[in-house]
């Protein structure tokens, strides 16, 4: 993710297209570090401009979304309303490729005189700010006041002349660079190729530096000295050509998705992600709004699932340790036959053993009379040693019989917890998490509070449509898996599941028709994607008609058995499928 100078250049180009001559009709401050402007334009109607100086997530974009402000407007919001409410936006600019936007505003003061003000938006991570200055460049106020005690870089306080933040360490303006200058600038940098680029030029993020390297088949982590002169020229040409397109307002806004999750965005084409799903947009504002909203959805669900993950991981760790201990006890119990043999042989040949002997050596009639050496307790007779060995055999036999059942129960509990882990990984809403929480309560992993079981709206399975128009349903948790398989699916519908691992039940509704081969492949990829093996290169998927899937008595939710099935090997993914409902 890079809110870099190139993204801002695209934003400035967009704001100049839509907002010039627009009048500011409303100003709100929905958050302490966020502003929302409503701007009336003649050609495009009302436009909303959202600006945030949040240290961890600064942004600026045009949006259709309206956020309500607090009942009592903050002081900075009131100041802006006093000065520029009704003002006209005359220009939007960016110094070089810096992460700064200047919005120039023309307005009338209390006396009716024409005045000029400027809103300076600095989108620089922890140094982000929104600064309001007069026509002489003196700060009127800012959304964040920065004193000398807070920052050694500069002060941002009312009455102080505005100065650009010196966060770039005198980096060069890439828009003014030519091929020779580029080569001269980075050639002798004692670092990697990508780092030499983004450390030398303002507004260039590490992502963009690696993109330029990728376009000319260079590993961005190579030392700069490893490049030949020809390769250096190719890199410089790719860089300066892109800068020229940016200067001319040529952009290609896009978001990169890994399956359905956004992982990156850019204002120019990202060739380095051509193996992922790159979606193009009409405007950079659409990109930013979509990206941040979708990213926030995934982040919010992960945060809300933290407590559930902790419960599941703790229980899984404890149960796995118990299983390992039971396995060790079971292996120890497998020695029981040896003790039974010792007891039998001592009963037959014990009369030959001298009193006080530490060992008895006798023929083993189960092994062609080969001699066997049996340890003895010298304080008791051979016959008593025989009884002692038979007693140990009986104890281990009883232990093994008990462990047969215990091991099965513990393994089922591990499988159950791993399936809940997978449910947490694919959850996309609070309703999904609530169903998982209910399952954990029902099975004793979370203390049940009677009368307080979550009654929120019921989560629905994923609903996909294949490229041939067949409906495919995917369970998000164990309860949904059971419901899909044994209530929604009919006998001739097809059932898919990743082989030998936790995963969702996938049901293809046939509607009495024969499925094309392509549907089997798409459903198989879907079953792989919603399983623990979703990141595997290849995965084996079992599939069969639903009528052949059975539910054992007293089995945990989501657990089934089947004995006759087909298999296919796939690469997990969502290719060819359309999500209807999540």
Image: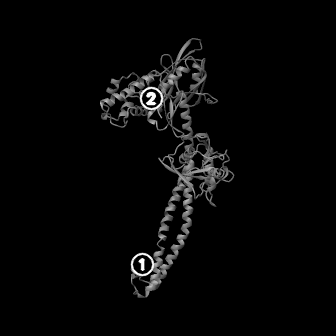
Query: Residue 465: horizontal and vertical position, in percent?
Result: 61, 41
**Residue 367 got which mark?**
1
* Circle 1 crowding by C-alpha within 10 Å: few under 14, some 14–19, many from 20: few
Nearer the observer, 571 or 447: 571
| Quadrant in which residue 403 is drawn | bottom right
The residues bearing labels 1 and 2 have C-alpha atoms spaced at a distance of: 91 Å
Nearer the observer, 451 or 293: 293
Nearer the observer, 257 or 42: 257
Q: Identify whether 29 is placed above or below 401.
A: above
* Number of numbered tags placed on the structure image: 2
Query: Residue 18: horizontal and vertical position, in percent?
Result: 56, 21
Nearer the observer, 471 or 414: 471
Label 1 SS: loop
| Quadrant in which residue 472 is drawn | top right
Q: Residue furthest bottom?
A: 351
Which residue is pictured at 56% across the width and 59% down the height? 412
Rendered-image quadrant of the C terminus: top right
Whichever of callouts 1 and 2 sits on the residue coming sooner in the sequence is 2
Give the residue pinned by disc 2. Answer: 148
Which residue is pictured at 54% across the width and 42% down the height? 574
* Circle 2 crowding by C-alpha within 10 Å: few under 14, some 14–19, many from 20: few
- Foreground tag (1 vs 2): 1
**Horizontal placement of 24 versus 190: left or right?**
right
Label 2 SS: loop
């Amino acid at each position: 993710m890079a809110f870099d100078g190139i993204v801002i250049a695209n934003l400035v180009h967009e704001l100049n297209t839509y907002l010039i001559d627009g009048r500011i009709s409303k100003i709100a401050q929905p958050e302490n570090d966020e502003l929302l402007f409503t701007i009336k334009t003649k050609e495009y109607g009302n436009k909303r401009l959202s600006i945030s100086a949040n240290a961890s997530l600064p942004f600026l974009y045009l949006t259709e979304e309206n956020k309500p402000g607090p009942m009592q407007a903050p002081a900075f919001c009131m100041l802006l309303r006093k000065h520029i409410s009704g003002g006209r936006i005359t220009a939007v600019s960016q110094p070089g490729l810096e992460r700064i936007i200047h919005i120039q505003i023309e307005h009338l003061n209390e006396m009716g005189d024409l005045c000029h003000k400027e809103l300076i938006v600095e989108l620089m991570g922890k140094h982000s700010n929104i600064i309001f200055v007069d026509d002489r460049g003196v700060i009127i106020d800012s959304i964040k006041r920065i004193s000398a005690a807070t920052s050694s870089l500069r002060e941002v306080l009312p009455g102080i002349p505005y100065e650009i933040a010196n966060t770039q360490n005198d980096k060069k303006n890439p828009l003014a660079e030519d091929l020779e200058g580029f080569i001269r600038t980075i050639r002798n940098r004692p670092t990697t190729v990508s780092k030499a680029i983004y450390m030398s030029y303002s507004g260039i993020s590490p992502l963009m530096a690696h993109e330029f390297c990728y376009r000319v088949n260079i590993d961005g982590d190579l030392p700069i000295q490893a490049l030949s002169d020809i390769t250096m020229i190719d890199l410089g040409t790719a860089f300066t050509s892109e800068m020229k397109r940016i200067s001319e307002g040529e952009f290609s806004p896009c978001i990169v998705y890994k399956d359905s999750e956004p992982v990156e965005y850019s204002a120019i084409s990202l060739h380095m992600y051509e193996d992922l799903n790159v979606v193009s947009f009409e405007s950079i504002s659409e990109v930013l709004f979509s990206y941040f909203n979708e990213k926030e959805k995934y982040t919010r669900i992960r945060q809300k699932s933290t407590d559930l993950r902790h419960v599941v991981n703790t229980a899984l760790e404890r149960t796995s340790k118990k299983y390992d201990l039971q396995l060790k006890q079971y292996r120890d119990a497998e020695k029981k036959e040896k003790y039974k043999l010792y007891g039998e042989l001592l009963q037959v040949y014990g009369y030959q053993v001298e009193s006080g002997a530490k060992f008895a050596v006798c023929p083993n009639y189960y092994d062609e009379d080969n001699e066997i050496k049996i340890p003895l307790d010298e304080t008791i007779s051979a016959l008593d040693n025989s009884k002692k060995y038979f007693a140990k055999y009986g104890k281990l036999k009883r232990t093994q019989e008990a462990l047969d059942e215990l091991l099965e129960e513990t393994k089922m509990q591990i499988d159950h917890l791993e399936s809940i882990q997978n449910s947490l990984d694919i959850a996309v809403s609070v309703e999904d998490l609530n169903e998982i929480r209910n399952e954990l309560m029902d099975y004793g992993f979370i203390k049940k509070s009677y009368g307080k079981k979550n009654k929120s709206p019921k989560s629905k399975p994923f609903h996909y449509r294949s490229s041939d128009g067949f409906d495919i349903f995917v369970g998000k948790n164990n309860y949904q898996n059971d419901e899909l398989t044994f209530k929604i699916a009919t006998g001739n519908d097809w059932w898919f599941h990743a082989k030998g691992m936790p995963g969702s039940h996938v049901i293809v509704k046939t509607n009495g028709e024969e499925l094309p081969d392509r549907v089997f492949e798409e459903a198989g990829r879907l079953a792989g994607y919603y399983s623990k093996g979703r990141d595997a290169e290849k995965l084996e998927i079992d599939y069969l008609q639903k009528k052949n899937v059975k539910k054992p008595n007293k089995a945990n939710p989501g657990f089934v058995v089947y004995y006759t099935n087909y298999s296919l090997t796939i690469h997990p993914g969502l290719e060819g499928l359309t999500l209807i409902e999540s």
